[in-house]
Image (cartoon, helix red, strand yellow):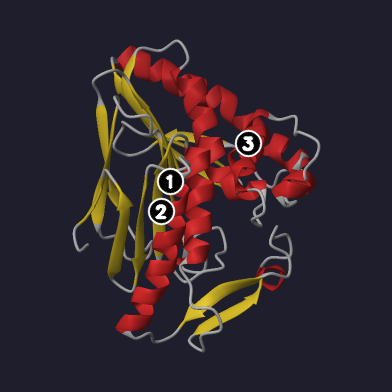
Amino acid sequence: MMAERPTARLLPDGRRLYLGHGPIDLVIEAFGEMAEVRRAYDQARDVFPAILPALAEELPLLRQPVDKITVDPTGPVARRMVAACRPYGGVFVTPMAAVAGAVAEYVLEHMIAGRQLSRAYVNNGGDVAVYLAPGQQLTCGLVPELHLPALCGQVSLAAERPARGIATSGRACSGQGGRSFSFGIADAVTTIAATAAAADVAATLIANAVDLPEHPSVTRAPARDLDPDSDLDARLVTVDLGPLTPDEVHRALRRGERAAARLRAAGLIESAALVLRNRYAVVGQPLTLAAA
């Protein structure tokens, strides 16, 4: 049984739509003729209520490591989650690493169906699915820490390029106010990929790679001690980070950069931005950081 009913309302600016249900919080904006925007928002409202119940039915499957999943899920969002994780054979990852991005792109797909829009996006807690008509582009600001909402750079998506997904993971998306855990110490890792689900998984894995194993300044705890329902079970996740020298910050970022470069070479991401203790690293384009 769901703990609450789905919520739908226009935000105070009158342009953006908010949809919420349990852990899902979507901020949606569409651009075009007002009548087309209204119909797009109606379509998003219509498809939204069924998403969380469908995911809840398949949670036992979706919390398994993707390498152990031999039966495809039945729900459309669940199928996107599994498909986004399949390329990472041999690495521990569960489909839950793609849930936010998969939800965003599923809602976007339904809201733009049959509509005449120039641009649209669905932002699910920082994991963003984007639609661009020919000749259009969208620029998004990068915020490395949720509790300090200051821009550190920007990313621009253009219709002539294939990327339509942006996602952010790291400590800023876990113990500092977000909804997931990280094995690593990155404040934030933002990725650009073909889809939001693909970007979501990649951001999680790159953030895991930004790390200093066995470092005394890193405090870790079993994920299940923090959340008994976590798909990470007894695996250690980062809960606090103490002092680091500039060299240690550099070494941790370099580990993440190498991971991001491998994913980019494999065609799994277009680019990534990594942030740790006000130090930045960029792999690929078109990401720009103010303090890179």
Res 113 visible: yes
Check disc 3: other Cα within 10 Å, few if <14, some if 14-19, many if 20+.
some
Residue 227: x and y in percent read 68, 66
Residue 151: x and y in percent read 25, 57
Left or right position of 49 against 283: right
Q: Secondary structure at mark 1?
A: helix
Report the amino acid beneath label 2: Ala
Give the labeled residue for mark 2.
Answer: 261
Q: Tell me the quarter of the image containing the N terminus.
A: top right
The answer to whether marks 2 and 1 mark residues whose Cβ atoms lie closer than 8 Å is yes
Residue 127: x and y in percent read 45, 45
Give the labeled residue for mark 1.
Answer: 265
**Outermost residue toward the bottom in this view:** 216
Q: Nearer the viewer, residue 232 or 273?
A: 273
Measured in 3D between alpha carbons, the distance from the residue under mark 2 to the one under mark 1, in whole angstroms, is 6 Å
Check disc 2: other Cα within 10 Å, few if <14, some if 14-19, many if 20+.
many
Q: At 59% from the left edge and 37% from the top edge, which residue is drawn?
A: 6
**Outermost residue toward the left in this view:** 290
Task: Kindly indicate the quadrant of the structure image that contains residue 292.
Answer: bottom left
- Residue 83's disc is 3
Q: Nearer the viewer, residue 65 or 114?
A: 65
Report the amino acid beneath label 1: Ala
Res 30 visible: no
Q: Earlier in the sequence, mark 3 or mark 2?
A: 3
